[in-house]
């Protein structure tokens, strides 16, 4: 007897675990994200505070505009070094030093450029600060740069590039690549590098030449005399400053530094939190299902309680109390697991190249409250409807046979409510996608959530016909076990639908992401095929932070294997009040390489004050050729450009929304880099030969990649593919949980059907047939979730692709193969989900199940 | 795969459709050991209707379960036809039950998700066979459930459900039918109908039935009654009447 009880408990424990797993995971991801944010915030706060301890004030140019966090945030023009002399006489200044920081990229010992500024942390070059209080770097080997050919590098770059003191390294910055000797290695406080950035430090004149231009500085740092506060010093400096400059305290600089670290992580945080919400959502379905089933199984018991005088409220209370226990346990485990998740994420960030400084894990009260409450609330909310059903049980039920589970299509109200929710969700989705609203992500997210919810509400209505259709071939394929499997799946549509809904969410999101990726890829490929006449593309690999010396393009133009070479400049500017990525091409060559689909004007008009605008933007802003476009440049401030060209193919253009002619670009940007060089091979030359010739020249520019058209296409879609992989991994987890949910539901259903399973075994159903019956039921449920998921996913994908048309995603591509693979995998997953429940059912003791008393 | 060969010749009365030899069934271990069957040797003659009776805990249900291959003996042997059940594994036992044994239980006899017709032919469907159409039609006609065939079990009365169960037990021409309190959940009229049908199955169709019951009236339908007490056969009665059975049962209480 004891064994029976122990086994029952164990079975329940597994059920409890399976039910709570999704909530656990959701809480863990939420807590993990928060713990990581707090930990990183705390560590970087300490780091920044320590590093800028000696800086009392900073003088810098006022921001011309604020760019995206990934592009460096505030865009400030450079200062003239002559300013330092004047400011040195300001009262309260004890020491000062100009700083010159900008784009510079180191090359490792294997000849490959270090870091990935286009996608990760920036690669910085700067001057070695002579004033020790103002110098954030700590030497761990060698000595400071003393001669023009010397460089000091950060410890992370030294490790990554296998560089030691005494080695030579090529530095890519303004002008041609040059070799420098590593004379020292530094740390940023205790960290190997500031947030994963690579750092190359030179003597001041060299740094100026390499990153800012001769005689230019990015800021000037000051130390106050004893007794002079930071505020006083900053105020004194402010009086002496010319127009357009500002003085801030060291505390402000520290705070800005800390904020920028947090901001750089914001995207990552949002991503993780979205996943946490998905996991909780999947968890809600599982909890709803488990509680619905257990409440149904306990109908008689609850009836008895009611007959003995328990109030509705008391019955409701018992179910909710059980849910609360599940919720609290799941949340507690989730919180604990959150620490592990945070550690894992930190390792992931490290692997991605964000140098994480060592520091203790910060487990804040906010984490416990927010993540813990989220877990508990979701559990209780999901259990509310089953609890109310339990409370509604009439006392007479105790004396009657337990009625069979709910059947049919669901009430008219349900269909009505579901349809209304669906309409609302779709409306929100489209509003967010196509209308100009404040927080688009929130509106779109809420819309998507509503659609999922509506489909799960309607799930019960469509469950019967879906099960019938999916299971249609089963009776012929698998005989009576197949027929019974289909009948069982249709037996309790509500339960089947809820199990399927949990899977639908994961599959829907995977389908959506797959469609988005395939559409983007198809659009990129078709655009390049259609409108890009370049044979070879050299990418700078520097993103928005720097680029290639324009001299490379000139050198390449001299090669006999090429006919046209176009350097594409890239940078940030503020247009119509918003930061935009812009590019510039020589108007002479643009027509040969980019078929931008001009709709008005021509490239010929792109002089010093011309700008090309994408058709949709022109339409939205009512621009025509000659219209004024207000642009703010970092270096030259507000300028008035005029529309010279309106183009119709955004993906074919050097930049999707706006581009300039080279002369306009060079007039407004002090630092001239090419972000890419596009080359057309000479007639009669093979692409391979042209590639060889170009590579021979470009090889010195270690950060660049030389690509033919196929490689260029792959490169353009690489970010999408990378994101895709990350999303897949996370969603696979959600799908796994959902499958566990199906297994759990099956186990509970089998428990309910013990007697009829016993009868079937008695009259001759073999164990194999029994397992097949349960397996096929599982497959039907899994396929139902998948079919709904694919439908929702295709719809989401279609809607988003439609919305991204103006960003150049012109093709809607339905990846049939991927979708078919998904459906097949779902079927297999159904088989896997049924393994444990079907085994347990097959081992059923026939006698116990058929002897009623 | 096991084949059971028994002569179905109506004249050979002594042919046993099933039998046990010194059957012992022990539940539990050591101190809490319960000897549910304590050396039972019994033959269930072919084309005969045998009832097993006895007070609660006498082991009558255990005997039925072990003889039918639903449960295994601790020691001793059980045969269906010539097949020694102790030599068969679970799969072989399942096939044996499916192809050669019919069952009628007290309740929850039918699978709720399929129709009455499908329930009747369930063992045949599980075997992937069509069965003897004429025979099945005859059974259905005899049991008077022809107009109920497309209904699901929950749409049938208790009596109708048991009649469907009897039809299922008969459908595959089994060597033997085991019935465990088949009228236990029925009112007396419905119970009498079911018992009459079972009697006719023996008389008119040559079937063999072994039935456990505690109801003297139900037992009076049988050709022979075997009385069990404390896991042993204590008495036997041929051509019983309800009154005689009642008298015999009263003696158990003494």
Image (cartoon, coloured by chain):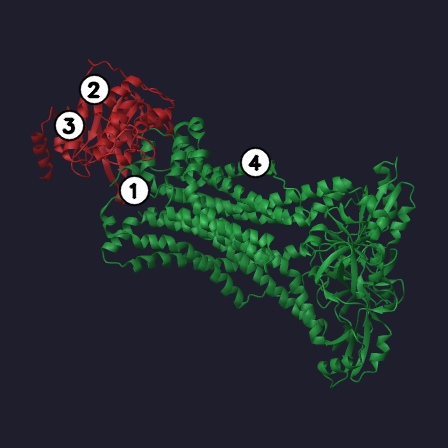
Chain colours: A green, B red
> Mark 3 to mark 1: distance in Å?
32 Å
> Mark 3 to mark 4: distance in Å?
64 Å
| Residue found at x 89% / y 53% | A551
Query: Tag 3: Cα neighbours inside 10 Å, few (<14), some, or many (≥20)?
Result: many
| Circle number at residue B47 | 2
Q: Chain of mark 1?
A: B
Q: Chain of mark 2?
A: B
Q: Chain of mark 4?
A: A
Which residue, given by chain and number where applicable, does mark 1 sit on?
B29
Which residue, given by chain and number where applicable, does mark 4 sit on?
A820
Q: Give the position of the N terminus of chain B as an image quadrant.
A: top left
Left or right side of A601 for A486 = left
> Mark 2 to mark 4: distance in Å?
58 Å
- Residues at marks 1 and 2, common chain? yes
Q: Position of residue A455 (x, y in %)?
A: 47, 46
Left or right side of B152 for B53 = left
């Amino acid at each position: 007897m004891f064994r029976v009880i122990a086994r029952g408990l164990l079975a329940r424990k597994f059920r409890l675990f399976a039910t709570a797993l999704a909530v656990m995971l959701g809480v863990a991801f939420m807590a993990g994200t928060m713990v990581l944010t707090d930990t990183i915030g705390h560590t970087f706060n300490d780091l920044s505070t320590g590093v800028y301890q000696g800086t009392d004030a900073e003088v810098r140019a006022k921001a011309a505009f604020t760019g995206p966090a990934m592009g460096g945030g505030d865009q400030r023009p450079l200062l003239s070094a002559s300013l330092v002399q004047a400011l040195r006489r300001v009262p309260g200044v004890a020491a000062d030093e100009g700083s010159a920081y900008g784009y510079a990229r180191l090359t490792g010992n294997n000849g490959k450029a270090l870091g990935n500024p286009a996608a990760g942390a920036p690669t910085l070059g700067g001057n070695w600060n002579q004033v020790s209080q103002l110098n954030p770097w700590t030497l761990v080997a060698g000595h400071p740069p003393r001669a023009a050919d010397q460089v000091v590098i950060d410890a992370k770059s030294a490790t990554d590039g296998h560089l030691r003191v005494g080695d030579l390294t090529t530095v890519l910055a303004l002008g041609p690549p040059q070799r420098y000797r590593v004379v020292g290695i530094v740390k940023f406080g205790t960290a190997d590098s500031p947030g994963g950035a690579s750092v190359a430090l030179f003597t001041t004149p060299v740094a100026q030449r390499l990153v800012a231009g001769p005689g230019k500085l990015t800021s000037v740092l000051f130390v106050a005399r004893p007794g002079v506060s930071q505020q006083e010093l900053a105020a004194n400096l402010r009086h002496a400053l010319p127009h357009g400059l500002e003085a801030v305290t060291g505390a402000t600089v520290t705070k800005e530094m800390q904020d920028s670290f947090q901001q750089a992580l914001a995207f990552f945080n949002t991503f993780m939190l979205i996943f946490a919400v998905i996991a909780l959502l999947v968890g809600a379905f599982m909890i709803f299902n488990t509680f619905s089933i257990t409440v149904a199984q306990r109908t008689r018991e609850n009836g008895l309680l009611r007959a003995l005088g328990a109030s509705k409220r008391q019955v409701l209370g018992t179910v909710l109390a059980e849910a609360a226990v599940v919720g609290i346990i799941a949340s507690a485990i989730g919180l604990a697991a959150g620490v592990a998740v945070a550690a894992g994420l930190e390792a992931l960030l490290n692997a991605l190249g964000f140098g994480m400084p060592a520091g203790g894990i910060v487990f804040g009260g906010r984490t416990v409250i927010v993540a813990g409450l989220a877990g508990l609330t979701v559990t209780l909310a999901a259990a509310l409807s089953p609890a109310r059903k339990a409370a509604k049980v009439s006392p007479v039920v105790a004396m009657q046979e337990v009625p069979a589970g709910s059947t049919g299509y669901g009430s008219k109200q349900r269909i009505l409510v579901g349809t209304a929710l669906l309409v609302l969700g779709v409306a929100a989705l489209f509003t967010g996608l196509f209308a100009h609203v404040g927080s688009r992500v929130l509106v779109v997210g809420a819309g998507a959530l509503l659609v999922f919810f509506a489909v799960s509400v309607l799930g019960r209505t469509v469950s019967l016909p879906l099960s019938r259709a999916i299971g249609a071939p089963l009776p012929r394929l698998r005989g009576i076990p197949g027929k019974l499997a289909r009948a069982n799946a249709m037996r309790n549509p509500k339960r089947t639908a809820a199990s399927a809904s949990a899977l639908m969410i994961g599959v829907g999101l995977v389908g959506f992401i797959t469609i988005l990726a395939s559409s983007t890829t198809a659009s990129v490929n078709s655009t390049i095929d259609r409108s890009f006449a370049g044979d070879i593309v050299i990418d700078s690999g520097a993103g928005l932070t720097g680029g290639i010396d324009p001299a490379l393009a000139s050198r390449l133009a001299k090669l006999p294997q090429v006919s046209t070479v176009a350097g594409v400049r890239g940078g940030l500017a503020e247009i119509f009040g918003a930061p935009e990525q812009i590019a510039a091409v020589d108007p002479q060559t643009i027509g040969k390489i980019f078929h931008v689909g001009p709709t008005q004007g021509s490239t010929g008009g792109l002089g010093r004050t011309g700008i090309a605008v994408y058709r949709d933007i022109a339409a939205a802003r009512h621009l025509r050729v000659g219209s004024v476009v207000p642009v703010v440049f970092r270096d030259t401030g507000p300028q008035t450009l005029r529309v010279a060209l309106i183009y119709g193919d955004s993906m074919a253009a050097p930049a999707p929304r706006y581009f300039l002619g080279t002369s306009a670009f060079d007039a407004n940007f002090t630092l001239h880099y090419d972000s890419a060089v596009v080359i057309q091979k000479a007639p009669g030359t093979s692409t391979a030969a042209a590639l060889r010739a170009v590579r021979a020249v470009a090889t010195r520019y270690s950060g660049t990649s030389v690509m033919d058209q196929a490689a260029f296409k792959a490169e353009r879609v690489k970010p999408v593919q990378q994101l895709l992989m990350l999303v897949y991994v996370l969603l696979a987890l959600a799908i796994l949980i959902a499958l566990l949910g199906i297994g759990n539901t099956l186990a509970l259903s089998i428990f309910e059907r013990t007697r009829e399973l016993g009868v079937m075994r008695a009259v001759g159903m073999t164990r194999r047939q029994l397992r097949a019956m349960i397996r096929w039921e599982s497959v039907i449920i899994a396929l139902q979730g998948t079919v709904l998921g694919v439908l929702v996913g295709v719809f989401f994908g279609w809607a988003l692709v439609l919305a991204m048309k103006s960003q150049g995603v012109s093709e809607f591509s339905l990846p049939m193969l991927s979708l078919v693979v998904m459906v097949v995998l779902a079927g297999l997953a159904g088989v896997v989900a049924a393994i444990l429940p079907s085994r347990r059912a097959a081992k059923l003791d026939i006698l116990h199940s058929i002897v009623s008393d | 795969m096991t084949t059971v060969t028994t002569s179905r010749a109506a004249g050979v009365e002594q042919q046993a459709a099933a039998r046990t030899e010194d059957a012992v069934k022990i539940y539990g271990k050591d101190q809490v050991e319960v000897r549910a069957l304590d050396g039972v040797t019994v033959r269930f003659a072919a084309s005969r209707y045998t009832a097993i009776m006895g007070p609660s805990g006498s082991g009558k249900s255990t005997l039925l379960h072990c003889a039918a291959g639903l449960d295994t003996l601790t020691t001793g042997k059980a045969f269906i036809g010539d097949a020694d059940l102790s030599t068969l594994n679970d799969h072989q036992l399942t096939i044996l039950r499916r192809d050669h044994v019919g069952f009628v239980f007290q309740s929850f006899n039918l699978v709720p998700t399929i129709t009455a017709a499908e329930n009747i032919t369930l063992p045949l469907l599980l075997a992937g066979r069509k069965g003897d159409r004429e025979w099945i039609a005859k059974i259905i006609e005899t049991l008077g459930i022809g107009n109920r065939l497309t209904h699901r079990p929950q749409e049938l009365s208790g009596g109708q459900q048991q009649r469907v169960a009897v039809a299922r037990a008969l459908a595959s021409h089994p060597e033997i039918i085991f019935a465990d309190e088949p009228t236990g959940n029925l009112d007396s009229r419905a119970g009498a109908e079911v018992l009459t049908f079972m009697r006719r199955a023996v008389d008119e169709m040559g079937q063999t039935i072994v039935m456990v019951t505690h109801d003297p009236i139900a037992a009076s339908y049988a050709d022979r009654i075997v009385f069990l007490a404390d896991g042993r056969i204590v008495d036997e009665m041929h051509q019983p009447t309800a009154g005689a059975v009642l008298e015999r049962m009263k003696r158990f209480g003494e």
